Image (spheres, rainbow, N blue to C red):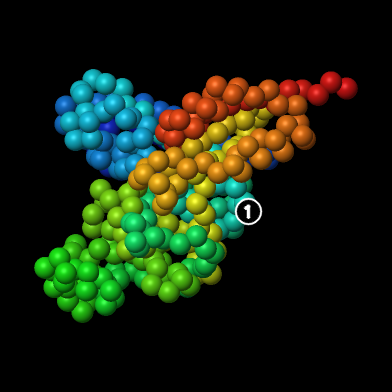
Amino acid sequence: MLAALIGSAIWPGRPVVGASWSLHEGQDLVGRVLWHRVSEADTLVAIARRYGVGYDEIVRANPMLDIWLPEAQRDLQLPLQFVLPSGPRQGLVLNLAEMRLYHYPGEAPNKVYSYPVGIGREGWQTPVTTTRIVSKVSDPNWYPPQSIREEALAAGISLPDVIPAGPENPLGSHALRLGLSGYLLHGTNRPAGVGMRVSHGCIRLYPEDIVALFAQVEVGTKLRIVDEPFKLGWLNDQLYLEVHPAAYASGEQGEPVVPAALGRLLTEIYETQDLQLNSAAVQAALDEASGVPVKIGRRLVRQP
């Protein structure tokens, strides 16, 4: 579907709702990188929403373009290729580092959906944990907790006890309550914040994406939240590496943090398979941390 929409001149004026792919045995890589020709009216924020990409994703993939005034007639990279997170492919998996949610529907085990999300900012971190959806709410009211009301009051803003459903409600049109007290998957009335660390810990989706996800999931669906700054995955006999800054880096904000586990995983692959590794490609992926999968090696055919 997306390939038919590339080019601002033929854009139909509505956002793409998430993305989905069929999976085959041994496949860890989905989607593909696409391109968009920038028009004079474009901003990176608007383009990101059109194609179902988060703010940080599109900025990291296009570091030379101005966010609000990208040069017209330039080709902008759409990072719509992903290595799937490690671990079980069941229910919902949120990778904080890439600020992206994956949904593996139980009724279609060979399919995956994916949505960009906004997560908690520094001091209000979205936790690494495992939980479940405990209820689904259409047109939710928002009851600001005392901690948020106090923070707002310190900034000179007095929040009411309840903000009813509607355009002023920061929860958007739908919410999925989690077994983790105080945390939700929800829409937003500020879609520009999707793909950023801006919330008080909750997980924000584009307005059109929360509607789609709300219809897909049931109460009881498991949510696994991980923080994987790097992901390794296979497509056929090609090995790919995808690198992001850690969700909450301990050093300089946005600095890539890649654990020594990467070296250990590559060593494990060497020990079990004939791998031809491109060390320069590995280093480039680590240096750039663009979030775009990079081919770093290939599996050699074993001789009988």
Name the residue rendered at 23%, 58% in the picture. Answer: 189
Q: Position of residue 155 (x, y in %)?
A: 15, 65
- Looking at the picture, does residue 91 appear above or below residue 283? below
- Asked if residue 234 lies left or right of residue 283, the reply is right
Name the residue rendered at 62%, 30% in the picture. Answer: 239
* Residue that mark 1 sits on: 88
Front one among 261 and 91: 261
Residue furthest toward the left? 156
Name the residue rendered at 62%, 51% in the picture. Answer: 87
For the question of whether residue 211 can be seen, the reply is no
- Give the crowd class for mark 1: few <14, some 14-19, many >=20 residues within 10 Å: few
Residue type, numbered disc 1? Pro
Residue furthest toward the front? 251
Front one among 223 and 153: 153
Q: Position of residue 140 (x, y in %)?
A: 30, 71
Image quarter where the N terminus lies is top left
Front one among 221 and 65: 65
Residue 201 lies in quadrant? bottom left
